Amino acid sequence: MSATHPPLPLLDAVAAAVGESDRPASVAALFKQRARLGSRLTKADIEAAMRALAATGRLHAHPPAKPGGGLLVHHQTPVRYTTERLAAALARSDDRVSPRKLRTLAGKPYAVFVDAAIAQLAADGRIQPTRFLTARQVAQLATMAETINSLRPSPLTLAALIAFLDGAPVAPVRQPVDPAEAPLDTALDEARLVRWYADDVARLGGLRAVAVPITWAHYAAWCTSRQCRPDSDLFGRLLLDMAARSVVGLTPHEHEGAIAADVARVLPRTRAGYLAYYWTVLR
């Protein structure tokens, strides 16, 4: 058989075999299916078919698994393939995944496609960009919002600001015309903490543990919109009381010494002696 001009039945057979594969297919992998593709085929015949299919766009060439490696083809483009791999990794992950870790999860050959894949996931609405903010960055964002709100006639909540960063239009919180006629609720309670927790669990892609600084940032922004000061003692006491009744679980940071001082000051210290950095609603 001529390896230069592969016949149409071979092209169709190779395209079908690759279309059923979850991973990019190599010449060797397809050669193992020669009983299905054609028992007299050589590796050169299969490679010629792969190259012809890639040239016409029916299949897509992928980077080799290692430098100097052989041809790989897949029914998805490298960017789309990377996008789907990252989406699956994010769905499985129990941790906050950084863009750097995503490059590791994608694998070295696909690292160059990660930025485009993240942008595609965000454009598709499958991830929110603020998912990659650290707890400290969210706390800093809340501090910035507090300063900006002091100069705005209509303050913004942290949730609205985060939604804006994720691409949604900002809806400012409207102050009542007469505060005396419509007093604002400035009392922090457990129900409010749990509502913030539920919002963050949804925003973080279903992760159960929420960083305490993220919840504090909600509280600080909420207080700013109500022209009151956040109370770290009250905030910590509520979390500790809920933990004592097994309503929530509190867990430490892996490296407590690495926690910045401005973040550590809002973390409640448990009876076990550690600073609670994450909290999880248990019931």
Image (cartoon, helix red, strand yellow):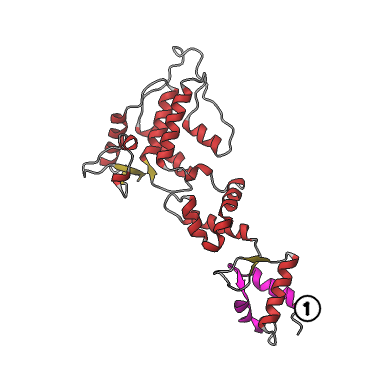
Which secondary structure class fits the magenta region best? helix
Q: Nearer the viewer, residue 131 or 70?
A: 70
Image point (30%, 38%), residue name: 242
Residue 148 against residue 59 in the figure, above or below:
above
Residue 222 against residue 119 in the figure, above or below:
above
Residue 280 appears in the picture as rendered:
yes
Which region of the structure is painted magenta?
Answer: 10-35
Would residue 44 be found to the left or right of residue 216 on screen?
A: right
Q: Position of residue 218 (x, y in %)?
A: 42, 33
Amino acid at dot 1:
Pro
Image point (40%, 25%), residue name: 223
Residue at which label 1 appears: 7
Q: Position of residue 258 (x, y in %)?
A: 32, 45
Q: Is residue 216 magenta?
A: no
Would residue 179 be found to the left or right of residue 271 on screen?
A: right
Q: Quadrant of the N terminus?
A: bottom right
* Count of numbered circles in the view: 1
Image point (37%, 38%), residue name: 213
Q: Quadrant of the C terminus?
A: top left
Q: Position of residue 202 (x, y in %)?
A: 48, 44
Q: Position of residue 253 (x, y in %)?
A: 32, 47
Q: Residues within 10 Å of mark 1 (few under 14, many from 20)?
A: few
